[in-house]
Image: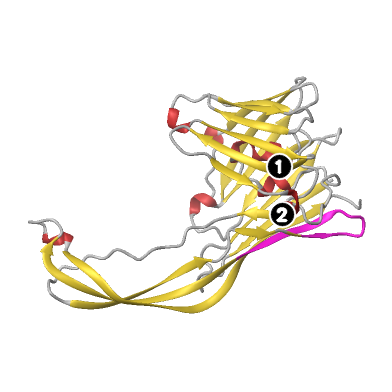
Amino acid sequence: MIRKVIYEYTDNEDEYKSSNESKSYEFKYNSLGRIAECVRKNGSDASEANLKYTETIAFDYTIANEIRIQNRRIYHDGTSSDGEIEKSTVMLNEQGFATRITFPADYVGFEYNADNRLSKIDNTNTKDDYDKFWITLGYTDGLLTKTVYHENYHEDEVWEYTVDELYPNCYANDKLNIDPNGFLLDIDDDYQMLYIMRLFGNGSKCYLEKIDYEMDSEGRPESIYTTPNETVHENYTYIKYTETVHPVVYAFDNNGYVTTMSWNEPFKKIHVDYDVIVGNTLKRPGYPEYGYEYTTTNERETEVETNKNRFFFKFRASKAH
C-alpha cells in the first residue's frame, strides 16, 4: 500500500523560482486496509501565507454504504481552522463506489457506465446557475479517452484523444491501491481524493501517458503616458509556451509498481523591444491622469532562453510489495 506521495513543481521561468511548489500526501490505514486519514502538507516554499498549511482529512466508515469526511487545516503561522472544520458525507452504492458527496449547502452526484467506470460528475445542484456544471467521461475498451466539461452559458470544453495517443505503452493501472490518474485529471479538490482512493469505480485500465496542460502567455503590459507628442522606447520579456500536450513519464520498480511520474512543460523566453508614439489626444477628455492615446511601432522579438518547468510525483510504499 502507498504510504506517501510527494509532489514537486520546479519553476524555471524566473531566476528567483518564485512559483516553486511542493506538497505531500501521507496515508494512514485502518485494520481493514482502508484509508483512514490523509495528511496533506503544502510546502513552506509556497508563495503566499494562505497556501502554507497542513490539512488532515479523516475518513469514517462506521455507517454502512457511507463515508463521513472531516477536513481540518492548520497554517504554518500557527493559526488553524478549528472553528471551520469542513464536513462532507459520501454515499456509496452496492459496489462500494461513490454516488454522491454531500456538503452543508449542496451536493455533487456521480454516475457509472455498465463497466462500473465513472461516466458523469453532476454539479448542477447549486443555487447559482453560473456555478452549475457537469462532466461526462467516455471510454474505449476500458480506457478513458474523452471528457467533456459542460457549463451553463458557455461552450463545451472537449478533451479527446485516441488510445494510441494516450496509452502508447499501455501501463496497467492495477498494482497500486491508489489511482495515480487522479493526480492528472482536472478534478475539483472537493472530490479529487475520492478518485485517488479508487472510490470512483474501476477507473481507466491504464495509466494516462499524456496530460493536457495549457498555460496562457502574458501579453504586452499596459502603460499610461501623460506627456503628449513624445516617442518612448519600451521593452518587456514574456514566456511563450511551446506545447499544450505533454508526455507523462513513469518509472517502475522490479515488481512493476510505479515509483515516479513526471512531465515537463517547455517554454521560450522572448524579449520584446518597441517604440511608443504618444499623441496629443487624451484617452478621457478632462482626465489627464489617464494619459494620451498612443500607437506602437518597430516591434522586435528576440528569443533569449529555452527551458522547461518540471512536474514530479514520487510514490512510496508502506512496505515491500
> Neighbour class for label 1 at 10 Å: few (<14), some, many (≥20)?
many
Q: CA distance from mark 2 to mark 1?
A: 33 Å
SS of the residue under disc 2: helix
Label annotation for residue 38: 1
Q: Quadrant of residue 123?
A: top right
Three-letter code, disc 1: Cys
Residue located at (22% from left, 65% from top): 224
Looking at the image, residue 7 lies above or below residue 137: below
Looking at the image, residue 289 sits to the left or right of residue 30; the answer is: left
Magenta stretch: includes residue 254: yes
Mark nearest the camera among 2 and 1 is 2
Residue with the most extreme left position: 286
> Neighbour class for label 2 at 10 Å: few (<14), some, many (≥20)?
some
Magenta stretch: includes residue 57: no
Considering the whole magenta stretch, tell me its main secondary structure. strand
SS of the residue under disc 1: strand
**Residue 9: percent from left, percent from top:** 62, 61
**Residue 59: percent from left, percent from top:** 71, 32
Looking at the image, residue 48 sits to the left or right of residue 113; the answer is: left
**Residue 51: percent from left, percent from top:** 53, 51
Looking at the image, residue 182 lies above or below residue 300: above
Looking at the image, residue 285 sits to the left or right of residue 87; the answer is: left
Three-letter code, disc 2: Glu
Question: Which residues lie in the magenta part?
Answer: 250-265
Determine contact: label 2, label 1, CB under 8 Å: no
Residue located at (69% from left, 35% from top): 58
Residue 268 visible? The answer is yes
Which residue, given by chain and number where applicable, does mark 2 sit on?
165
